[in-house]
Image (tube, helix red, strand yellow):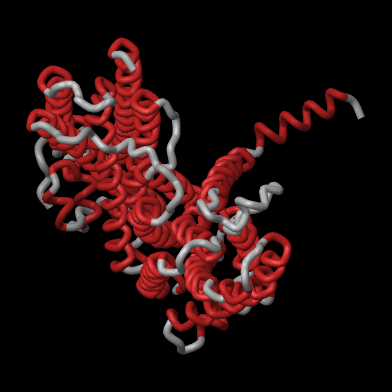
Amino acid sequence: MSRRQYLALVRRDLLGETRRLQSLLSMVIFAVVAMVVLHYGWHAGAGSAWAADGSGAVPAAMLWVVFVFAALLGLGRTFAHEREDDCLDALLLLPVDRFVLFLAKATTNLLLLVVLQAIVVPVFALFFLDVTAWRLLAFVPVALLADVGMAAVGTLLATLVLHARSRDLVLPVALLPLLVPLLIAATSATEAVVDQGAGLGSIAGRLGFLAAYDAVMLLVAWGTYDILVSE
Amino acid sequence: MSIEEAVWYVAAAYAVVLAGVLALLAYTARRTQRLGRQVRELRKALERDE
Amino acid sequence: MTADETRNPCISAVPMSPRERLYSAPALFLWAALVLVAGVLLAFLVAPIDASSMGFSQKIFYFHAPIAETALVAFGVSFVSAIVSLRRGAEHASGVGEQLEVAAVRLGLVFSGLVLVTGMIWGRAAWGVWWAWEPRLTTFLLAVLVYAAYFVVRAAVDDEGRRAVVGSVYAIVAFVTVPITFFATRYLPEGLHPVVITSSGARMEGSMVLAFVVCTAGMLLLLAALLRTEVTIARAQAHVSRVKEEIERRQAAGPAPDRAGVATPGGAAERGEPMEGTGRSTR
């Protein structure tokens, strides 16, 4: 193979595939959002369980960074069954309120997220954290509320990109920015849980915020799902 | 920061805003022009049709 | 022709020249320009230099904050437009409402970008840092990301009708996220010490308030002018497409029978426009 062949192919690829350049925009957005998420997952609170350790410890809130990217993989598969086996139309023929469909899909996603967390969090705590197990229980409401939010928004967006091209790229790009406020609240609450010195009262505000976020997103889903799914 | 230095920053900020606004106006003007061209073509098509 | 098209002089006179008829939008542009110039003059000649450590760099505020508010208004317009489109149903989702929504998002995005740039410049001048994770900058960074994704999502959908619905739903979710993000960054993180770039000094004197209000009004007028133009263009383009379709349909059907003088609405449109070249068509 000659060098000219190589250059010609590269040039053809770049110039001909404007879609590649469109993907660039998606990738840039994704990278920037990832950095924003990392920022909010990076800053340990003052009395974090890490401060004393000092061995390049990972802040507890990093858990959320790990978790949300794992969750993205699962959420993308929300309608995989319907797509692969071609039964979306059959599903739509069912005489159910569309929002009920949404709730069903979202519940499945929620369960997946909860199970994922139930496995990942203890492992994470084992590897990285130095906190009593019963204090870790305080993490449960945080996790649940955050999972509800992620499931709700994730399912809604998975429906949005149902018929889209390159949906594996579009879903994360569209979903991540919308999840940022949720992640801010969740990481901030996690810091409070892990920080041995902090009182647990500060978590209440974060829980309230998460609940509000969940409520708003569910409301939007309720209002829009009908028209979104009808064809 | 002294006023002399600050002036450059303020000028830069206003320049950016101006550039942005002008870009928006140019974009809008171009679309209006394109619409005008479409309409002229349409008129020609209608007259031809007569 | 729908009723509002006949009432709108821009549409009924479209075959003439849209440029001649966009009188309402140019008027708005003129007003916007006048008010903005007045605002700049007020900001630099009348309002005093800020007494706090920000000093002269505070002058950036007179555009930074109004542009921020205008961006939010633009996003609000996209939100309302999206809701209205969806309420009309999937068949009506695409059309002028969709164009308004897209234009509003585009304008909001551009203005948000300006907020970020002016905010960073101001931050550098006033506080020495190019970036700080403070509420306004972070919220607008998120807004840029969310609304840039709006275009990514739309571009991924091939079917036009579905694209409109998807875009509208996303616009609704996106708009809801903006105030949520603002509250999250403002009230939640602790242990961070955000540089409060947005404070405009301990007290805002009357002349400062005046300059600020005038600049805000000017920016909103500019937004109104741009949106008005977009709507007119969209309506005119829809009209043009419809007439083109009608022409093609008639050409396909064959010339003779249609010109027998049958007073069909489409026929009147074809024959009326070239002959009645001036003034408003009455239909």
Q: Is residue B44 visible?
A: no
- Name the spot of residue B42 as percent of width and height, x first: 31, 38
Q: Residue at x 62, y 67 (%)?
A: A131
Closest to the observer: C1 or B24? B24
Q: Is residue A47 visible?
A: yes
Q: In screen coordinates, is C221 left or right of A26?
A: left
* Residue A12 falls in image quadrant: top right
* Residue C193 falls in image quadrant: top left
* Quarter of the N terminus of chain C within the rendering: bottom left
On screen, C192 above or below A188? Answer: above
- Name the spot of residue A44 as percent of width and height, x first: 55, 51
Q: Residue at x 60, y 51 (%)?
A: A51
Q: In screen coordinates, is A167 left or right of B31?
A: right
On screen, C220 above or below A189? Answer: above
Residue ranking furthest to the left: C206
Closest to the observer: C279 or A111? A111
